[in-house]
Image (spheres, rainbow, N blue to C red):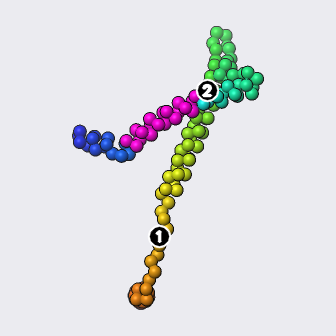
Amino acid sequence: MWNDFKAFALKGNVLDLAIAVVIGAAFGKIVTSLVEDLIMPAVGLLLGGFSIADAVYKVGDATLKYGAFLQSVLDFLIISFSIFMVIRLFMKFRRKEEMPAEEVVPELDKKEELLVEIRDLLKKQQL
């Protein structure tokens, strides 16, 4: 069982996945900082100093912080869109790398052409 686990854990795909998770977490922090520290304050300025996160609705003693929820939804949309764009960019580079080179069809000399014609004629006769 230990050998099976070791073989699984040391496969390239598992290591690639672990690296991707670490890089993704770091990228998520960068985008979160972008949203919280740059984009949302700019949106607040455009709205005249109003912060979406501060919007509340009071019902008796209860306070519904719907603004914080809307802020979280907006953060999620911005973060997911930016991650989508980065992944799309990487996939574009990967597709270019994976495109196979066009196969060069070798030139046939006269003997090979005659052999191909004979083969084709034999196939026609068998049908």
Residue 78 percent across, percent down from the top left = 61, 35
Is 48 left or right of 31, judged from the image as shown?
right
Q: Quadrant of residue 61?
A: top right
Q: In the image, what residue occupies the spot 41% across and 41% down?
A: 17
Does residue 22 show up magenta in the picture?
A: yes
Q: Which residue is mark 1?
A: 103
Q: Does residue 26 sit above or below 98 in this rendering?
A: above
Secondary structure at badge 1 equals loop
Q: Does residue 104 sit above or below 112 in this rendering?
A: above
Does residue 23 show up magenta in the picture?
A: yes
Position of the N terminus, as image quadrant, is top left
Q: Which residues are magenta?
A: 15-33
Position of the C terminus, as image quadrant, is bottom left
Q: Residues within 10 Å of mark 1 (few under 14, many from 20)?
A: few
Three-letter code, disc 2 = Glu
Q: Which residue is mark 2?
A: 36
Is 82 left or right of 106, judged from the image as shown?
right
Residue 72 percent across, percent down from the top left = 60, 27
Residue 38 percent across, percent down from the top left = 64, 28
